[in-house]
Amino acid sequence: MEHIGEIEKPTSNFARARTIQLLRERLPKLADVTDAEINRYGGDLLDAANCLDRCRNCTGYAECWREELVKGYVTKYDVADGKIKLQQGVKCKPHLAHEAREQQERMLRVSGMTDKERGFTFDNFPVEQARRHRSILERATDLADGDGSGTGIYFYGPPGIAKTHLMLAVLNRLNDRGILAVFVRADRMIDKLREAIKNDCEEDVLERYMTCPVLGIDELAQEPRLKEYGLECMIKILNYRAAAKLLTLFTSNFEPYRAYEQHYEKFPEQIDALRSRVALLSIPARMTGEDWRLNSYSEQLGPDEEV
């Protein structure tokens, strides 16, 4: 018996009859369909038969037998009331899986996270901090398991108590679930906007932070150099996100109402506006604990003996 992959489009009545016979053998649903109906869709049915036969032993999208332009696409058929129903250009499961992987890789690139930052999860969140902050952890987990909407969290407290870890755990889980979550330090965001001005793409960078589904801003109000431009950009970003009700999270060493306190005399109106937007976008979550960085000094090298 001929292999279906060897079937070509018929060029004579004999070849056409032989092709119809082979199609009925390979596509069982055609058993009671008229020759005329099969002939009407002959070329497309040949493709559907080839897809069924050759895709049966698929080894993955990368090894697809199809030509590049139709790689990962299949033709499907069905029969209802003696009529053939065709679906062309259907993405196969390996194709969809390939696209999902590519989308995930794009998301991780856009997220702005380093490999180290992608490693912060709920599973490796410090046990002591998890016990100390059960309600905060529960709220963070709810956000991470949600649909990427809702009111964000403003994690604040002294340095080294895993504020950033917890925010990254939320962002990483959202990214893993296919919801784009971008991470950026406040000072780095302003630096990127300054660089964008030189490259004439400021609006593109602004739009990225304004419109991404979820945004996590780390170390808010801790920028070493603060200028009016930076504050205005931050207000513009937060203003848009508040109006669009986009999920936004923050970490800071300062209570929300004290954010940028050291610069308040110089920029009172802008700082009031920024604090107001932060309040619209998030609820405060005060965290406490000991600075793990300082505790790391418990492991140190010393003299082998006193001299």
Image (cartoon, rainbow, N blue to C red):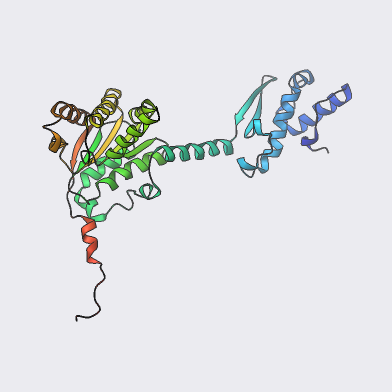
Which residue: 29% across, 28% down?
237
Spot occupied by residue 149 in the image (x, y as percentages of width and height)? 32, 31
In-front residue for pair 296/187: 187
Spot occupied by residue 17 in the image (x, y as percentages of width and height)? 84, 25
Which residue: 30% across, 32% down?
247
Task: Describe residue 61's horizontal placement relative to residue 182 as left or right.
Answer: right
In-front residue for pair 143/299: 299
Q: Residue furthest front?
A: 198
Quadrant in the picture for residue 139: top left
Q: Residue furthest left?
A: 265
Quadrant location of the C terminus in the rendered image: bottom left
Spot occupied by residue 120 in the image (x, y as percentages of width and height)? 34, 49
Quadrant location of the N terminus in the rendered image: top right
Quadrant in the picture for residue 262: top left
Count how many numbered circles sit on residues in the image: 0
Q: Is residue 114 above or below residue 214?
A: below
Quadrant in the picture for residue 111: top left
Which residue: 20% across, 49% down?
159
Spot occupied by residue 304 in the image (x, y as percentages of width and height)? 25, 79
